[in-house]
Structure formats: structure tokens, C-alpha cells
Image (spheres, grey):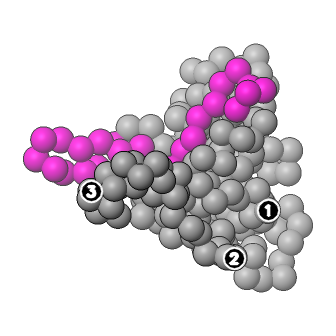
């Protein structure tokens, strides 16, 4: 949208139509989410959507195969077997040696490739920043189109802590050198289930 079109829309009081252009009749939300997540440096893993494999035993074996054998797993989901047991009273500092953190997202946003996490899903809020690798399980039925719909979800208003994650931690310097995983999570993998 050009600057002139935007300003003309405002002048004609067509702000809503100008800011929110019509969307396709039936968007492919998982595909749009995956494309946006990949652009942000994350990994969209739709293996379980494309195959008939299901069940948490298969998911556990699949996750173990993605990371080195000596990786320490910490899971905030009961379906994934982990070496590090924790609960809401666990001190955040005790998670500093976690290699792979596994959480389940409330919902995802197709427009940005972001996943919504809150304290019930994380159990210990710092898990999303202390783990070297963050694996997020996302039910594709819970992908919404854009951020404006995210504010209509009940989860942000019922949680003490919320965060939207869109990729690995990154930093850039004044010379435009971007480093993914420089601090915090080195990579983000979202597994569609």
C-alpha cells in the first residue's frame, strides 16, 4: 500500500478498509505460519501433518533423534519424557543447563509466525529463554490469521505472564551483522500436531 493510498483512505474515512485489506477466502494458515516463521529464522516442522504417524511415543522418539544423544530435555508438556523434572516452584537458575526445552503453545499467528506462550504452558517462565533449543508443539487448529485476532483470545487476559516468540534470539550490531542465537534460545522449532 502506498503512502498516498493510505492518506487518501484516511481522508475519506475508509481507515478500516485501508488498514485491513480483504483477505483471501480460505487462507492456508499452517502454510502461511510456516513461511512467516522460516523468514524469522525459526524451523517449521510439519512432519506429523504429512505422515500418518501419531502418538506421543513416536513424537518422543522423533525429538530424541533431532538432538545429540546426551542432550538434557526439559518438558513442560506431560507427553514428552524429559530428564529434568520441574514445577512452578523450581528456581529458574536450575534450568541453565537445559539443552532442549519443550512447551505447548496456546496459539500461533500466521501473519508473523509467532507462538503465544504463558505461565501455564511454560511452568517456569524463563524456560523459553534459558534452553539452548526451544521446541514448541502447536496444534494447527489453533493458528489464527493475524495479530489483531490475538487480542481477542482469552489466554492473554487469564495469565500472569505472556510472551510471543517468533524465532531464535538475535542481535545485530551497527555494521548490520545479524547473529541468531547469540543469547538466549539458539533455535526455535515449531512442530505442527
Q: Is residue 174 above or below residue 188?
A: above
Label 1 secondary element: helix
Q: Which mark is residue 99?
A: none
Q: Earlier in the sequence, mark 2 or mark 3?
A: 3
- Disc 2: which residue: 26
Percent position (x, y) of residue 184? Answer: 44, 37
- Residue 59 appears in the picture as rendered: yes
Q: Residue at x 82, y 68 (%)?
A: 58
- The picture quadrant where one finds residue 182 is top left
Give the quarter of the figure containing the N terminus: bottom left
| Crowd tier of the residue under label 2, counting other residues whose Cα lies within 10 Å: few below 14, some 14–19, many 20 or above | few
Q: Which residue is mark 1?
A: 141
Residue marked by disc 3 = 3
Residue 86 horizontal/vertical position (percent)? 76, 28
Residue 131 image offset from top left, x and y in percent = 55, 40
Q: Position of residue 123 (x, y in %)?
A: 74, 29
Whether pointer 3 and pointer 1 mark residues with C-beta atoms closer than 8 Å, the reply is no
Instruction: Count the marks.
Output: 3
Asked if residue 26 lies left or right of residue 36, the reply is right
Where the C terminus falls, by quadrant?
bottom right
- Residue range in magenta is 156-182
Q: Indicate left or right for 113 with 145 as reference.
A: left
Q: Give the distance between the C-alpha atoms of the residues marked 1 and 2, in whole angstroms.
A: 14 Å
Classify residue 45 by image quadrant.
Answer: bottom right
Q: Nearer the viewer, residue 151 or 95?
A: 151
Q: Is residue 86 visible?
A: no
Mark 1 or 2: in front is 2
Amino acid at each position: 500500500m502506498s503512502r498516498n493510498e493510505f492518506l487518501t483512505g484516511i481522508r475519506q474515512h475508509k481507515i478500516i478498509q485501508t488498514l485491513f485489506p480483504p483477505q483471501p477466502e480460505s487462507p492456508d494458515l499452517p502454510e502461511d505460519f510456516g513461511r512467516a516463521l522460516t523468514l524469522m529464522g525459526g524451523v517449521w516442522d510439519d512432519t506429523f501433518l504429512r505422515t500418518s504417524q501419531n502418538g506421543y511415543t513416536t513424537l518422543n522418539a522423533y525429538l530424541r533423534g533431532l538432538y545429540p544423544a546426551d542432550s538434557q530435555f526439559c518438558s513442560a508438556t506431560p507427553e514428552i519424557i524429559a530428564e529434568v523434572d520441574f514445577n512452578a516452584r523450581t528456581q529458574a537458575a536450575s534450568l541453565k543447563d537445559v539443552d532442549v526445552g519443550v512447551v505447548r503453545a496456546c496459539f500461533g499467528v500466521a501473519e508473523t509466525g509467532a507462538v503465544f506462550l504463558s505461565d501455564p504452558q511454560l511452568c517456569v517462565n524463563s524456560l523459553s529463554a534459558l534452553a539452548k533449543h526451544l521446541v514448541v508443539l502447536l496444534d494447527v487448529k489453533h493458528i489464527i490469521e493475524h495479530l489483531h485476532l490475538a487480542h481477542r483470545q482469552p489466554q492473554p487476559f487469564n495469565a500472569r505472564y505472556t510472551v510471543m516468540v517468533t524465532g531464535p534470539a538475535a542481535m545485530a550490531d551497527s555494521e548490520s551483522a545479524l547473529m541468531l542465537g547469540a543469547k538466549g534460545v539458539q533455535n526455535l522449532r515449531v512442530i505442527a500436531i
